[in-house]
Amino acid sequence: MPVTRMSMASREPDVALAVIRGLQPGFDFARDGDDAAFSFAVSHLGDERLSLDRLDLVCTARGVADPMTTFNVCEASPGMRLEVGREQLDTDRPFLYPLAPIESSWEHEARADSVRVDIDAVETLAREYFGRPGLRVRFTGSAPIDAARERHWRGVAKHMRGPGSEPEVFDHVLLRDALFRTVAAALLSDFPNDTLDLPPANDGGVATPASIRRAIAYMEEHISEPIGLVDIAAASRLSPRGLQDAFRRIVGVSPTQYLRSLRLSAARADLLAADLVHRDTVSAIAHRWGFTHVPRFAAAYRTEYGENPHETLAR
């Protein structure tokens, strides 16, 4: 999946309109005031499954837009007013754009930070996890479920706009996949939707030592690839829930914890073999093995091996 980047600014309304329509279908706006007060800036980073967008429009205006073609969670500047039909969205909190036409208005300036995820990609994960081939994800509200879920989403979005948006992170397929899975899971757990009461798939398969061996062999073989619980479960011939239960009972940890341990071991091998002449760093090695947050990587590494990664690198 190719990564696309864009960053630009202009004082030309026609330029702004053309660029914004590439991010928000059918967008149009009517301004109040003179052209001299107008400016806009936009940035975009993403691939076909996940993207980060930032928009800043300096003007007073009213806008309209067609329904979004992605799941899009936005944090907007104070004073922005968004309406879907007769419903006014609460823009003081993170909000999920409904898949419906939207009207907007603002005074002086409109700023918005958005995290977008592809609808088909999210539904594919949900279908596999819940074991329902025809499942469609339908959101029943635009605001987070409660204050705790709002804090969780803000934390995920903050990470996306911080370490997750660093070029070397988003360019790495393992890291990008981890970010997508994190965002998709947060979206489904933090905003009201019709999958919240569904139990994970449990197909009645019996967990055996052979099932666990197949799962471990798959993880070892694909350690450097973007894999998740659903992939590992398919290789083990169990449902995701069945694999989780079996792994905790037989191995003592979850499959994703075991995969993290494998990747920590691979990172340790790279740290021990690092060539300081070619400037191998703890950060580069952590990113290579799918750890987007270097301080958390260091803490996990220290727990696993009793020393800091910098100490291993210095040997």
Image: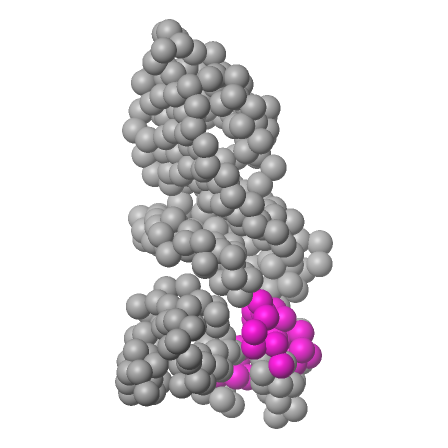
Viewer can see residue 22: yes
Q: Which residue sits at x=64%, y=63%?
A: 128
Q: Which coloring applies here?
A: one colour
Viewer can see residue 185: no
User: Hey, which quadrant is residue 109 in on the image?
Assistant: top left
Q: Position of residue 40 (x, y in %)?
A: 41, 25
| Magenta span of residues | 221-248
For the N terminus, which image quadrant? bottom right
Decide: is 133 above or below 111: below
Q: Nearer the viewer, residue 199 or 138?
A: 138
| Left or right, residue 218 beside residue 78 | right
| Left or right, residue 282 beside residue 134 | left
Name, please, the residue furthest toward the bottom: 209
Q: Which residue sits at x=62%, y=89%?
A: 213
Q: Which residue sits at x=40%, y=45%?
A: 144
Decide: is 204 above or below 315: above
